[in-house]
Image: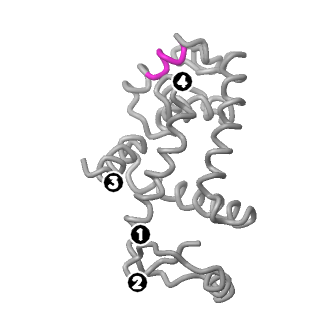
Amino acid sequence: MVEQNMAGYCSPMSAKAAKTRHDEGPAPADGDFGWQLGMLLSAYHSVIAPVLDPLPHTMRGYQILSTVVHGDQPTQSALAAHLGIDRTVMTYLIDDLVEAGLVERRLNPADRRARKIVVTEEGARRLAELERHVRLAEDALLRPLRPAQRQVFRDLLRTVACNARGIDPRTDPCTTAEHLLADAAGG
């Protein structure tokens, strides 16, 4: 187990200390939150990148494909806005996913000027396979947490992430993540 020191960084923790720490309730709210997020994001990238490497645009491609399958964005523009991706960039991303046979553009029945992005049979198959591999990689990353804690962590993270979208809707989450990863790598 790992314990957080006063600066928010991690140090080894004995099993007895870990049990006591969990029995005491949550740790104090001090520490370097940015460092913790940066470390988690860097570790996430390390375990997820190999899984998503065959997909066009790796993480962005995965986010688009997942949103097309699990969401209901009526237009390509709405999809871009939902994911926080510039509309012109989204065009190129979708072009590559179309070329790979994973999605296709169809006329939106409600607005013939707009295009709705729909998954192909191959896209649905590939996403299901990727989701299994991503979940295994995420579970490996979250191994220090018990299964129930993992679910709580995911639920809390989703709540904060969805709420944070309102901070600056023009900020592309992928660009933010790229900057954080570059900073964590010392670049």
Residue 165 image offset from top left, x and y in percent: 47, 52
Residue at mark 1: 33
* Rendered location of residue 123, percent (x, y): 66, 20
Looking at the rendered image, the disc whose residue lies closer to the viewer, 4 or 1, is: 4
Residue type at mark 4: give it: Pro
Q: Earlier in the sequence, mark 2 or mark 3?
A: 2
Magenta stretch holds residue 94: yes
Does dot 2 land on a helix, a strand or a loop? loop
The residue pinned by badge 2 equals: 6
Q: Nearer the viewer, residue 38 or 119?
A: 38
Q: CA distance from mark 1 to mark 3?
A: 14 Å
Whichever of callouts 2 and 4 sits on the residue coming sooner in the sequence is 2
Q: Quadrant of the N terminus?
A: bottom right
Identify the amino acid type marked 3.
Answer: Ala
Label 1 CA crowd tier, 10 Å (few <14, some 14–19, many 20+): few
Of callouts 2 and 1, the N-terminal one? 2
Residue 106 in the image: x percent, y percent? Answer: 61, 13
Q: Name the residue tied to disc 4.
A: 54
Q: Residue at x 44, y 40 (%)?
A: 84
Q: Is residue 47 magenta?
A: no
Q: CA distance from mark 2 to mark 4?
A: 41 Å
Dot 4, crowdedness within 10 Å: few (<14), some or many (≥20)? few
Q: Amino acid at mark 2?
A: Met
Q: Are marks 4 and 3 in contact (CB under 8 Å)?
A: no
83 left or right of 33?
right
**Is the stretch drawn in magenta largely helix, strand or loop?**
helix
Sequence-first disc among 1 and 3: 1
Q: Are marks 1 and 3 in contact (CB under 8 Å)?
A: no
Numbered label attached to residue 184: 3
Provide the residue span drawn in magenta: 93-98
Image marks 2 and 3: residues in contact by CB distance under 8 Å: no
